[in-house]
Image (spheres, coloured by chain):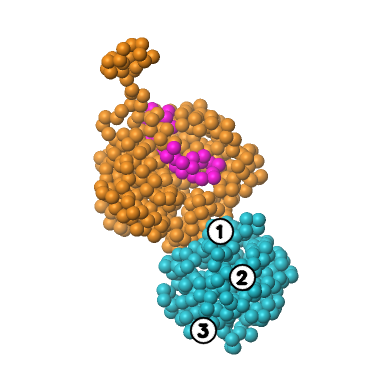
Chain colours: A cyan, B orange
Amino acid sequence: MELKTIQTLQVPVRYFEAGSGVPLVYLHGAFGLLAGDPFLDLLARHYHVFAPLLPGYGDSEECPGLRDMLDVTLHGWDVVDALGLADPILVGHSMGGMIAAEMAAVAPHQVSRLGLIAPCGLWLDQSPIPDLFSLMPYEYPRYLFHDEAMGTALMTSGLALDDWEWLKSFLVANARQLGMAGKILFPIPERGLSQRLPRIRARVVLVWGESDRFVPPAYGQAFQQKIAGAALVSIPEAGHMAIWEQPEQVLAALARL
Amino acid sequence: MRFTWFNLMPWPYLPDDFRQTHRSVWVDIDSRLFDPAASHAVYNSYLDLLEYAGTLGFDGIGINEHHQNGYGIMPSPNLIAAALARRTSDAALVVLGNSIALYNPPIRVAEEFAMLDCISGGRLVAGFPVGTSMDTNYCYGQIPALTREKYQEAHDLILRAWRHPDPFAFNGRWTKLRHVNIWPRPIQQPNPPIHIPGGGSLETYDFCIDNTYSYSYLSFSGYIRAKALLQGYWDRVTARNAPDTSPYRAGFAQTICVAETDAEAERLYAEHVSYFYNRCLHVFPGFADAPGYRTIRTIQSGALSQYAPPTGGYASLTWKDLTEGGHVIAGSPETVRQRMEALIETLHVGNIFCIFQVGNMPADKCMYSTKLFAERVMPALRGFFPEHADDGRFWCKKLERRRAPGSLPDEAELRARLGIEAGSWN
């Protein structure tokens, strides 16, 4: 998987590119993307994958000009344009799903296939989404994984909270990444998408882990109700990180696009 | 030297097992621990103490703003300041301050501070904190990475509203106003002195230096641990070519407990200090610092490591640790004087925000400690920085003739003055 840079209207954007075939743009969640992400590798075996990093993620440049949902949505289209893609399959996970849905809603004629994996963007009082921004790292696994023990092993390897230098680099990465995410997710991950969802004209597959304790499955139904003809695929033994826990099943669901 | 008697207004009835049974004193503190009927006495006692301090020669009495917080039951410091403006006559009203990014529109702050300045006869010292992440982000929902931008805009609007004599249009990103024309206007022109509480952000250092605002470090970890942070500030003052290094460019908050002897101080105050450090500072770490709230530059500077809680947290600190480590300056007047001198010299600060009301300390002990300080410590510290004695840039400029509250004429005089016959109005 190759990490490249492309200049967009406002900021150079880092993106992973791999595979061949039908172009697919993958928008990551709030925790970002690492080289060697197993789900990305799997996607690349079937599609020509482009996975841009939101500014501030990984080693990419921050973009103070991105302040709100509209800025981020239009930036998403700037990236697609810069990559020279026309009507790629658009897929997003979690925060990336929220951005992808917004992109499809503001430009309904420019996207015909949309995959939303446990997207944020709606708010249901009866199923509140936990406050990502006040969770301690040790609390992540219980919200993000069906199998908490496996999630803990995945997420806490390499943590060295007693080492100031390590902590500093962690805090810097966190400030850059979640600082950016906060512009569209803090304090409530909802920016009016609900009233825009009916504008979407794409074929839509919604993919949800049955044990998602972060964005609970009730949100899948809420999305489905707002998007005409959207399919909702529930994946057993998977949480919010269904892309890591059941990647083959997520892939199979996206294949319906 | 300028001494401000500062009251955080802690809630004094957190249970003994608070640390074990509750995760945080701030943000999601259990509302059932607040007893509104009991708060009636608490608030009035705290106001009494502030007023008492105002009679003992303190230069100022100080308050601040916190939300959903068990050690600060003062979400609206301006309400408290209004009460104090009427019941005190001489001390500066140091409001440290209003978290200006939280007021919508921010001219509300310009208006309320102007009212306070007018009512008090020019006694306002205005504080403009960015606000803690707990208050600003977690309680009041501001987006962390955009908080500073919003703060900066609010600051610019407030200052312009105070200084500009004619109506103007303000087209900000966060606030758009067609007719800015605040009414009333502050007595102190062009604006009341401004203090900026900060916690080590480089941006705040520069902001203070460039605008001639006083930088105040309100920590609970005492003067010894604050040295590196304030040295960072003074280094910055030099690096930015400020015209002087007046100690009044900086302020520092210090917890102080005075008794007749060191042993008596421990006997009288140890339990209340323990209450504060054990229960009041029990903040869930997830609320400490929303990602994006601090700039990358500040995190990378390493400033944060210096005021991180000690390993094991404050709860493990004993009276001996807290006093020897300088978290708390406590003891006889002589001991406290020596340590205060060390504080003033070490940090080079002219404004001291003295915290005498500690945790659940009852009013009588607080009065005793306050009075001993005022009479037997404060006078001995007045002689510092004689070369800057005339530096009035960072302090209020009171009206010379101020009207005392309750100065309506009595009714008999009024009848005589108005020519109203006795009997027609009783």
| Residue at horizontal 39 percent and vertical 60 percent from the top | B173
**Which one is nearer the viewer's eye here, A19 or B237?**
A19
Which quadrant of the figure has residue B353?
A: top left
Q: Quadrant of the N terminus of chain A?
A: bottom right
Q: Are marks 2 and 3 on the same chain?
A: yes
Above or below A117: residue B201: above
Whether residue B287 appears in this view of the structure is yes
Residue A86 has which mark? 3
Q: Secondary structure at mark 3?
A: loop
N-terminal of the pair, mark 1 or mark 3, is 3
Q: CA distance from mark 1 to mark 2?
A: 22 Å
| Crowd rating for badge 1 (residues with CA inside 10 Å; few <14, some 14–19, many 20+) | some
Q: Amino acid at mark 3?
A: Ala
Q: In which chain is the residue bearing label 2?
A: A
Residue B28 lies in the magenta stretch = no
Tell me residue B199's x, y (percent). 44, 51
Tell me residue B402's x, y (percent). 29, 30
Q: Amino acid at mark 1?
A: Ile
Residue A188 has which mark? 1
- Magenta: main secondary structure equals loop
Tell me residue A123's x, y (percent). 60, 60
**Which one is nearer the viewer's eye here, A193 or A186?**
A193
Residue B58 lies in the magenta stretch = yes
